[in-house]
Amino acid sequence: MAKKKEEKVDVITNEEDVVVEEVMPTKDEIIEDLQNEIKVLKNDVLKEHANLENIRKRLEKERITERKYAALPIVKQILTPLDNFDLALKHVIDNEAVQQFAKGFEMIKTQFIKALEAQGVSEIEALNEPFDPNFHQAIMTEKIDGVEPNIVIDVLQKGYMFKDRILRPAMVKISE
């Protein structure tokens, strides 16, 4: 290891003409300090690069999720008219002309369902299934002989999934 050679410089101040000796660093010390500073700066650059990469990945993931669920607001709005189609078609009418209209409404409802399914909407199966609070909302209970407790015995309003998210839980009546 090389011996350190210290250079001394006399500094004279104007205050009472005091002579102060100041030690100047050697070339090796300067080089070592600069190398340490380079290491610190390289480490900082690597951290910032990793930080930017993480931000880029997070933004890309958010963009993909946003695209995946872009149709969600309009799909939610279509559920109410679809429910109204179901309510209207439940009524049986003896009039032949009205039955023809009902067939037309049934066809329109089927087209709505196919369009929703193409976008990733699916109905939550509930009838005669075990009650699952993640997919069902129990509105009523009823004691029925021969039926196990917590089984869905009636669907009051259909529930729907949009891809892997719940649009609306099924409102159900369950057995006690």
Image (tube, rainbow, N blue to C red):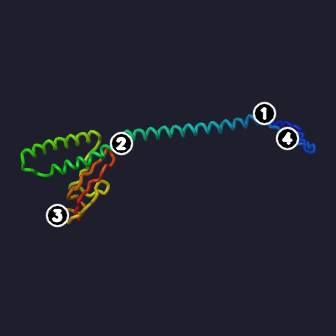
The residue pinned by badge 3 equals 146
Q: CA distance from mark 2 to mark 1?
A: 63 Å
Q: Are marks 2 and 1 in contact (CB under 8 Å)?
A: no
- Is disc 4 surrounded by few (<14), some (14 to 19) or many (20+) residues within 10 Å? few
Kindly state the secondary structure of the residue where label 1 is placed.
helix
Quarter of the figure with the C terminus: bottom left
Instruction: State which tag comes first along the sequence, 3 or 4.
Output: 4
Say above or below: 170 vs 21. below
**Sequence-first tag of 1 and 4:** 4
Q: Which residue is mark 2?
A: 69
Against 144, residue 40 (above or below) is above
Q: Earlier in the sequence, mark 2 or mark 1?
A: 1
Nearer mark to the viewer, of 2 and 4: 2
**Which residue is found at the position 21% from the left and 64% from the top?**
142
**Amino acid type, callout 4:** Glu
Q: Position of residue 150 (x, y in %)?
A: 25, 61
| Percent x, y of residue 19 | 91, 42
Q: Secondary structure at mark 2?
A: loop
Marks 3/4 in contact by CB < 8 Å: the verdict is no
Tag 4 residue: 22
State left or right for residue 95 relative to residue 126: left
Residue underneath mark 1: 27
Question: Residue 85 location in percent, x, y?
Answer: 19, 47
Q: Nearer the viewer, mark 2 or mark 1?
A: 2
Amino acid bearing label 3? Gly
Q: Quadrant of residue 140?
A: bottom left
